[in-house]
Amino acid sequence: MTPNPLTWLYVPGDRPPIVAKALAAGADVVVIDLEDAVAPDRKDYARAATAELLAEPQLNVHVRVNALDSPWAADDLRALTPLPGVSGLRLPKVTSAEEVVAVADTTHELPLYALLETALGIERAFSIATAHPALHGIALGEADLRADLGVRDDAGLDWSRSRVIVAARAAGMAPPPQSVHPDIRDLDGLAASCAHGRALGFLGRAAIHPRQLPVIESAFLPTDHELEQAETIVKAAMREEGAQALPDGRFIDAAVVAAAQRTLALARRT
């Protein structure tokens, strides 16, 4: 996978021409969706079309399978797990560590990513995040969570967002990507929402249209000012170990230096 992926482009699994366009759109990760984007009467077709595509190696393609308690999940896992084109599986509506373990035991160490979309999933976020070594990340599914909680104002989700971010970091995972911005025409709103998500601690974001990708990438990459500050901090740390004050009065210690190094690594995408 691309180091520090920032863009995760979701595409319906039952529309092969759109999948082909998504693969060429420049997203860090393409997520072929067999769940929310596919009607029940097209589940089998979507699975078969996805399996045909992923029978050949692909670069950074994940599949969101159907919910684990659905009638399609077992067939999804059975058909997709052995394919060379699958880089990871995204598991929707996870509510327990046991669900992750059950999938991991059948997928031969294929990277898994759990989507937390209910109040119960959020409450068990750290337990889920530490369920199995095959689990590489957790993320929030805001549309379902919003419905579960009865939240109307966007700010009502901030506690849940922070809980998922903290759980991921406490489990030693990368910060999770932010959930989708559903209005593909509202790029200004997307940019503002990304800025808020970045301030909370998200890294990157899921998208549902290629036009959202450059906005997301720009929002989460370090600014020129942030890079300049990070370079100053790292250079100062190389000259002198331990806590110190910079000429402009800023105090730096090991934690500040580590954050600056992460900023530089993100800019290099390493």
Image (cartoon, rainbow, N blue to C red):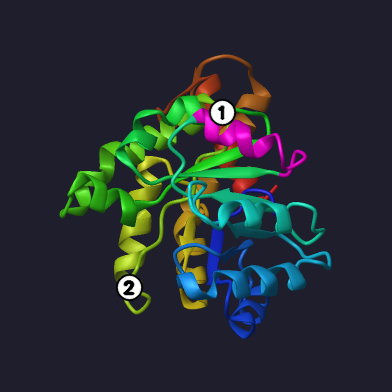
Can residue 87 be seen here? The reply is no
Rendered image: mark on residue 257:
1
Give x and y (percent) for residue 194.
38, 57
Estimate how packed mark 1 is, as few (under 14), some (14 to 19) or many (20 or more) residues with alpha carbons within 10 Å: many
Q: Residue at x 34, y 41 (%)?
A: 161
User: Distance from label 1 to label 2 (Cα)?
Assistant: 38 Å
Give x and y (percent) for residue 154.
21, 53
Q: Residue at x 58, y 14 (%)?
A: 242
Q: Residue at x 40, y 51 (%)?
A: 141
Tell me the quarter of the picture where residue 120 sits. Answer: top left
**SS assignment at label 1:** helix
Give x and y (percent) for residue 92.
48, 50
Does 171 sit left or right of 84 as displayed? Answer: left
Instruction: Note whether 138 is above or below 192 in the view shown.
Output: above
Can residue 245 be seen here? The reply is yes
Mark sitting earlier along the chain (1/2): 2
Rendered image: mark on residue 183:
2
Instruction: Note whether 145 is above or below 205 in the view shown.
Output: above
Viewer-side residue, 173 vs 42: 42
The amino acid type of the residue labelled 1 equals Val
Q: Residue at x 26, y 45 (%)?
A: 157
Dot in front, 1 or 2: 2
Magenta stretch contains residue 116: no
Does 250 sit left or right of 153 as displayed? Answer: right
Viewer-side residue, 37 vs 151: 37
Give, as a single range, the part of the protein colored magenta: 97-110
Which residue occupies the extreme front position in the image? Answer: 71
The amino acid type of the residue labelled 2 equals Asp
Magenta stretch contains residue 106: yes
* Pointer 1 with pointer 2, Cβ within 8 A: no
Viewer-side residue, 127 vs 3: 127
